Image (cartoon, grey):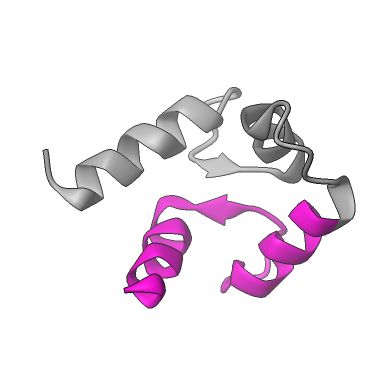
Amino acid sequence: MSGEDVIDCLVAELDKDKSGTVSAKELMEGLGDLGVDVDTVKAFIKDHDKNGDGQLDANEIKQFFKNLL
């Protein structure tokens, strides 16, 4: 499984409403008990939401991971 396939699976798992994007609420639910607060999640989305829709799509999440490398 490629890195992109892993990210696609992650997005599919987080995307509970099957909209093709991950909202702040879905990301918070996906993070579970990691102790990340809502403001941190919203700031993360704002920083990585390139199209300005307030959510992260698979391409935006892929770009985030590519920037880490």
Secondary structure that dominates the magenta span: helix
Q: Quadrant of residue 31?
A: top right
Residue in view at x 72 percent, y 68 percent: 46
Percent from the top left, x then y, of residue 4?
23, 51
Q: Is residue 8 above or below residue 33?
A: below
Q: Is residue 60 above or below residue 25?
A: below
Q: Is residue 51 above or below residue 39?
A: below
Tell me if residue 32 is in the magenta stretch: no
Percent from the top left, x then y, of residue 14?
54, 31
Percent from the top left, x then y, of residue 64?
45, 67
- Front-most of 50 and 1? 1
Outermost residue, left direction?
1
In the displayed structure image, the side of residue 55 where residue 57 appears, left or right: left
Residue in view at x 59 percent, y 42 percent: 22
Q: Quadrant of residue 35?
A: top right
Tell me if residue 45 is in the magenta stretch: yes
Quadrant of the drawing holding the N terminus: top left
Percent from the top left, x then y, of residue 67?
39, 76
In the image, which residues are magenta?
A: 40-69
In the displayed structure image, the side of residue 48 where residue 57 appears, left or right: left
Quadrant of the drawing holding the C terminus: bottom left
Residue in view at x 70 percent, y 35 percent: 34
In the displayed structure image, the side of residue 40 where residue 32 appears, left or right: left
